[in-house]
Amino acid sequence: MNNQQKIIIRVANIADTHYAQQITDEMESSAKARGTGIAKRSPDYVAKKMLEGKAVIALTNNAEWVGFCYIEEWSHGKFVANSGLIVSPEYRKSGVAKQIKKRIFDLSREKYPTAKIFGLTTGLAVMKINSELGYEPVTYSELTDDEDFWAGCKSCINYDILMSKERKNCMCTAMLFDPADHYTPKETTENFEKKSKLYERLLRIKQLFRKNKNGSGK
């Protein structure tokens, strides 16, 4: 990795679709190297996420691909998943994965403010990042029951294990961020608004007093 290169992390768009093949190739290669499974995605699927504004990409200032992650919506928007996190081998252990996860998490909160955000992972590093973002380990029963989501696991090498466990657990750890557990109480909001209005009134009075005092001194 060239330390002189700047890494830019942003929401992906139509201009990034040519990276889709490279991204999916690295997803598959990484899964094989770890000996664990992930739901396989096609380049068309990844490109579609870019076009929908539901993906985050990391690039160097020389347009070299660094990392990627995308959002999936389930159960009519009640759940969303930050899926497919992948970083180019050259940029791993650089902290970029954490930055991508933070940006895709923020994007998910912007697009789906009331949705529960969840993920399935076998990676300890991802678990740590999720914990820092407010995720908590949960049982599979707390995740979406959307059949399309679970159908996506069919390409995973551990799918037989998942089904033998009746979808109650598998090799992946389930983690969930519930916005209901991370809110500002109404009372706190109301108190803040009241104090803000009071502060504004006091500020106006002080400004008026200062203006009158300066005027009388002339």
Image (cartoon, rainbow, N blue to C red):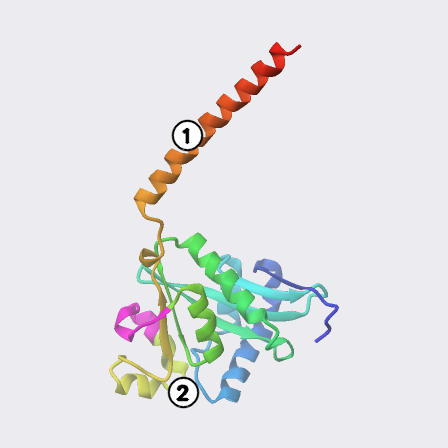
- Can the viewer see residue 77 in this picture? no
**Which residue lies under the disc numbered 2?**
157
Is residue 67 left or right of 155 when viewed as pictured? right
* 194 magenta-colored: no
Of the pair 154 and 31, the residue shown nearer to us: 31
Q: Which residue is drawn at 57% across and 20% down?
A: 210
> Is residue 77 positioned above or below 65 on the image?
above
Badge 1 density bin: few <14, some 14–19, many ≥20, Cα 10 Å? few
For numbered disc 2, what is the local secondary structure?
loop
The magenta span reads 136-150
Q: Quadrant of residue 178?
A: bottom left
Badge 2 density bin: few <14, some 14–19, many ≥20, Cα 10 Å? some
Q: Where is residue 180? Give x, y as percent.
A: 31, 56
Amino acid identity at mark 2: Ile
Is residue 83 left or right of 22 when viewed as pictured? left
Q: Residue at x 32, y 88 (%)?
A: 160
Q: Where is residue 190? Give x, y as percent.
A: 34, 39
From the image, which quarter does the C terminus lie in?
top right
C-alpha separation, residue under disc 2 versus residue under disc 1: 61 Å
Amino acid identity at mark 1: Leu
Q: Which residue is drawn at 50% across and 72% down?
A: 85
- Nearer the observer: mark 2 or 1; the answer is 1
For numbered disc 1, what is the local secondary structure?
helix
Of the pair 105 and 46, the residue shown nearer to us: 105
**Which residue lies under the disc numbered 1?**
198
Is residue 92 left or right of 61 when viewed as pictured? left
For the view shown, which residue lies furthest in the front direction? 217
For the view shown, which residue lies furthest in the right direction? 4
* 147 magenta-colored: yes
Q: Which residue is drawn at 48% across and 65% down?
A: 70
Q: Where is residue 173? Give x, y as percent.
A: 37, 78
From the image, which quarter does the N terminus lie in?
bottom right
